Image (cartoon, rainbow, N blue to C red):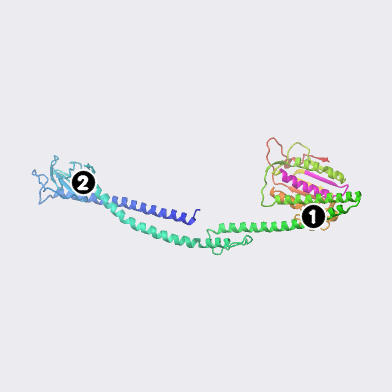
């Protein structure tokens, strides 16, 4: 597992060590350049002095050579060797005959290599001859290296001291984070209170805030799950009890007619229980934190015709005029979504409309474009929903005060509109309840955000609405 503290220490100490090395190298080159300037000027002064004076007034122009004594000592790298020459290039004097400096009649500095050693030579030229002062280049490099070597140990020591201070600083800085981690570790699975930001460093505040937001969402999710399970258990208790009573009635039936009636009621109870379980499964699949599993282009007109066709037999049995209204022109009202979930959405709306619409009533299901946005519209001539209850009908298991009395096949599960809103939210659509212009019934409007471009399909636009007619099919 990677450690932030160790990573920071490695990078910072590595940067400090590299900085120390770079400072030493810069010191070496700067010192070497300074030494070149100083010693080059010194060589010039020595060469000119030798050209003017040589032992007790001996002049360069004299023809007799001055032979120095034989030298057997070890040469000193920092020693300056002096040589005098006649104008014709004959060596008159050398302070160290072992060094075979070449004759040069050019004034100034030169850098010859003698027997594998680099030298720096200054030649002073006059009419009486040439005087040279020479020094090994290695002497200057050695002195520059010694200067850089003296700088490096303090820098290394400084790096070690800074590293120690960094360790202390990082541990103190990460202390509040470790405390927050221990606080979270001590909590139980049900303890989702936010972590205190009081002592958390500001650099870590975004991370801890994100964790707090996550725990808040988890707390809400767990609370919703507990409420859902409690509500589901409560709702399932009633149909299961009813089924048990119906089974007992069936067992006690003494003749065929009683058995047939009890069996019919048992079958209806099983159907209601099956629908409730199906609705509960739909609720579980449309949780707000979920994602649309299969996003494909969905034609709302085709969806309306398919769903209305599915409910046509039920509508006919209940003597309800069920119709599908779609654009008469060839085109597509296409949105991006999960086809199966959108089918569940429209199924719930149509089934609710059929449940509360009396015999002889009308249920219209329409796919249209309004103000440039695709819409699904389900209108019925039932009793409608009072304004006071419209804010709550989207809550799970909520039933209106007169829902049981008005429903044609029982009061329903109280989950239909909750499922509709959940699916709509996941598709970026908005659900609204309206009252028809006649003042009787209910209109449920599902308004989507935008079209999906589909090659080869001519979509209806807002500009087309004035000239486009709709076609209603009765099922």
Residue 355 in magenta? Answer: yes
Q: Is 178 left or right of 216, judged from the image as shown?
A: left
The residue drawn where x is 56% and y is 64% is: 198
Toward the viewer: 235 or 473?
A: 235
**Which residue in the structure is indicated by mark 2?**
122
Secondary structure category for the residue under label 1: helix
State the mark number for residue 350.
Answer: none
Toward the viewer: 252 or 99?
A: 252
**Which residue in the structure is indicated by mark 1?**
240
The picture places residue 182, in percent across and down from the top left corner, at 55, 62
Q: Which residues are magenta?
A: 339-366
The picture places residue 99, in percent across and down from the top left corner, at 17, 45
The reply to whether residue 283 is in sight is yes
Secondary structure category for the residue under label 2: strand
Say which label, 1 or 2, has the lower sequence index. 2
Task: Determine crowd level at label 2: few under 14, some 14-19, many 20+ residues with C-alpha closer than 10 A.
Answer: many
Toward the viewer: 104 or 201?
A: 201
Q: Which secondary structure dominates the residues rendered in magenta?
A: helix
**How many marks do you count on the picture?**
2
The residue drawn where x is 73% and y is 39% is: 332
The reply to whether residue 36 is in sight is no
Residue at the left extreme of this rendering = 64
Q: Is 173 left or right of 98, judged from the image as shown?
A: right
The residue drawn where x is 66% and y is 48% is: 291
Discs 1, 2 touching: Cβ within 8 Å: no
User: What's the CA distance linking mark 1 and mark 2?
Assistant: 115 Å
Task: Determine crowd level at label 1: few under 14, some 14-19, many 20+ residues with C-alpha closer than 10 A.
Answer: some
Residue 44 in magenta? Answer: no
The picture places residue 305, in percent across and down from the top left corner, at 78, 41
């Amino acid at each position: 597992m990677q450690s932030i503290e160790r990573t920071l220490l490695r990078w910072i100490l590595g940067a400090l060590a590299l900085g120390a090395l770079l400072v030493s190298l810069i010191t070496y080159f700067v010192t070497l350049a300074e030494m070149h300037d100083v010693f080059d000027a010194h060589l010039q002064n020595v060469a000119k002095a030798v050209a003017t004076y040589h032992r007790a007034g001996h002049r360069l122009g004299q023809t007799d050579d001055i032979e120095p004594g034989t030298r057997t000592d070890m040469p000193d790298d920092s020693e300056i060797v002096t040589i005098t020459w006649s104008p014709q290039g004959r060596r008159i004097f050398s302070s160290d005959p072992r060094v075979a400096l070449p004759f040069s009649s050019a004034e100034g500095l030169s850098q010859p290599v003698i027997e594998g050693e680099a030298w720096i030579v200054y030649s002073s030229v006059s009419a009486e001859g040439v005087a040279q002062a020479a020094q090994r280049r290695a002497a200057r490099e050695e002195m520059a290296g010694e200067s850089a070597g003296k700088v490096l140990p303090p820098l290394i020591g400084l790096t070690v001291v800074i590293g120690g201070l960094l360790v202390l600083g990082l541990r103190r800085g990460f202390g509040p984070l470790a405390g927050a981690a221990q606080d979270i570790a001590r909590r139980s699975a049900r303890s989702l209170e936010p972590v205190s930001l009081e002592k958390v460093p500001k650099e870590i505040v975004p991370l801890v805030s994100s964790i707090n937001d996550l725990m808040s969402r988890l707390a809400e999710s767990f609370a919703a799950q507990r409420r859902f399970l409690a509500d589901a258990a409560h709702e399932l208790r009633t149909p299961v009890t009813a089924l048990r009573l119906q089974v007992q009635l069936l067992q006690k039936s003494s003749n065929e007619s009683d058995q047939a009636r009890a069996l019919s009621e048992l079958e209806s109870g099983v159907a209601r229980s099956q629908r409730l379980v199906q609705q509960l499964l739909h609720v579980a699949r449309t949780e707000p934190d979920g994602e649309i599993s299969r996003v494909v282009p969905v034609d709302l007109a085709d969806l309306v015709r398919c769903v209305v066709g599915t409910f046509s037999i039920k509508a006919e049995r209940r003597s309800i005029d069920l119709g599908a209204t779609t654009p008469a022109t060839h085109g597509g009202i296409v949105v991006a979504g999960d086809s199966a979930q959108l089918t569940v959405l429209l199924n719930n709306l149509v089934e609710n409309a059929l449940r509360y619409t009396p015999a002889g009533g009308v249920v219209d299901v329409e796919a249209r474009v309004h103000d440039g946005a695709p819409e699904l519209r389900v209108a019925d001539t039932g009793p409608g929903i009072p304004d006071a209850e419209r804010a709550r009908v989207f809550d799970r298991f909520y039933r209106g005060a007169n829902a049981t009395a008005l429903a044609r096949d029982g009061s329903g599960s109280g989950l239909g509109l909750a499922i509709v809103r959940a699916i709509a939210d996941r598709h970026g659509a908005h659900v609204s309840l309206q009252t028809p212009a006649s003042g009787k019934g209910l209109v449920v409007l599902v308004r989507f955000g935008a079209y999906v471009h589909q090659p080869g399909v001519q979509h209806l636009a807002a500009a087309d609405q004035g000239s486009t007619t709709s076609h209603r099919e009765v099922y």
